[in-house]
Amino acid sequence: STSVYNRNRIIMCRTTTQKNNTSELKEGEEWIKTFDINAFRADIKALGDKLEAQQGDDDVRHLNKIVGMANICAAAGILTMGFGVNFFSIFMLSTWTFARWTMIAHHTCHGGYDKCHPNKGRWNRFKFAVGSLWRRICDWLDWMMPEAWNVEHNNRHHYNLSEIHDPDLVEANLSDLRNSDAPMFMKYGQVLAAMVTWKWFYYSPNTYKELKLAKLRREGKSLPKGVKPEDAVTIKSILQGLNPFYSASELFLVVFAPYFVIRFLLMPLPIAAAAYAFEMDASAFYWNSLTNLVLAEFLTNFHGFVAVVTNHAGDDMYRFRDGCRPFSGSFYLRQVLASVDFDMGNDLVDFMHGWLNYQIEHHLWPNLSMLSYQKSAPMVREICKKHGVPYIKENVFWRVKKTVDIMVGKSSMKWFPESYERAYLEADAIVEAKKLAK
């Protein structure tokens, strides 16, 4: 029954009660001594409820504006990509791909417009880009399979943030590079290569792995022998046939092929046909278009890396040992301590950041709209200031530097003081027990 399930959740979250060890606290952590996790939870939850209740037509109009900006990028890139290899086309095509993923698909797939958008058949987390190849093509066509990304990002990452089971934990995923004895210049070279290829070689294969894992769990099947679910799959293991979740041919045909065929084989054809109709060099227009599309992929990988990978990495970000209950006091605290915001303030700045500059706010309430995050940021900062919780907002390129330092092993993330982590989990369990007892 539901009550039994919830009681089991409480037991799972309970930890051994122990006196908090203030000697664990380092410089800058003095706020933890007097932090009231229940009061913090109440303030964050109240603000989230208020923001959700206020969502409506303004949020839909704002979404339409962002869709329009993405479409302008698409039109500008596609209509100019045949006229020689040029940065304008590359930038516009890159930004179009970036916008469709980080803003339009991202917030729709989280349910940010489920309640306020009148078109429930499309702008809904259970409809957008999922269920068929046609929906994927129309709504969000990228290297990642939308259903796989929904599992990996919306579920695993958001509700295991900076824990060992977080599939996007940079420090853990780059442990081989961090611990390597290779010269530092070689490590930086590997990071640079990863920046422009990471969606192909890391993100797409591993989101698909998480989809396969979710299916095994749903069917009650055991994991393949020797498999650690938190370990990332690599292109090397896939090509060597060592990946226990899927074959290289399945990855290509199911996940990669739709995007590859449409974006690189079919999209240049109308441009070449138009050139032929106007008695221009159709072959040159085709190859110019293809070259621009390929170069745009490298740029959008880089753009995505800068805006996405840097959100939860740095020597000022915390890691945690145990899982916590969603939307508990521990959950809300972790979203702030393990996330960072970037420069923000207007739609153009936010658009170029992919709306990932509101990462703290987004992790507190994943199912709100982009407009709600804009509104909420000053209020979240005030709540954090009230409770003494560090709220980090820095330039995105400074965060790239901090992220790269983590990747190559020059710095490490912080661990939240263990006795306080356990005490907060115990406090969460008590709150949940009181709710169930009512």
Image (cartoon, rainbow, N blue to C red):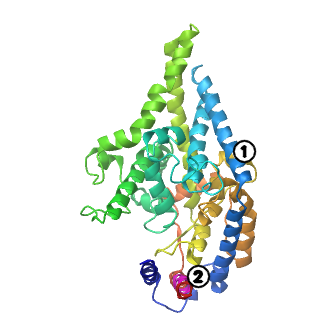
Instruction: Say which residue appears at 56% left-offset and 39% top-offset.
Output: 97
Report the magenta residues as a range: 425-432
Q: Which of marks 1 and 2 is nearer the N terminus?
A: 2
Q: What amino acid is found at the position of numbered circle 2 in the picture? A: Leu
Residue 10 highlighted magenta (yes or no) = no
Question: For the residues marked 1 and 2, what is the alpha-carbon distance in whole angstroms?
Answer: 40 Å
With 244 as the anchor, is 391 left or right in this view? right
Asked if the residue at tag 2 contacts the one at tag 1, i.e. Cβ–Cβ closer than 8 Å, the answer is no
Residue 23, percent across and down?
56, 87
Q: Quadrant of the C terminus?
A: bottom right
Query: Which residue is under mark 2?
Result: 25
Q: In which quarter of the image is the N terminus?
A: bottom left
Residue 405, percent across and down?
53, 57
Looking at the image, can residue 370 be seen? yes
With 309 as the anchor, is 206 left or right in this view? left
Residue 420, percent across and down?
55, 83
Residue 426 highlighted magenta (yes or no) = yes
Choose top left, top right, bottom left or bottom right for residue 30.
bottom right
Query: Which residue is under mark 1?
Result: 348
Residue 209, percent across and down?
37, 54
With 45 as the anchor, is 280 left or right in this view? left
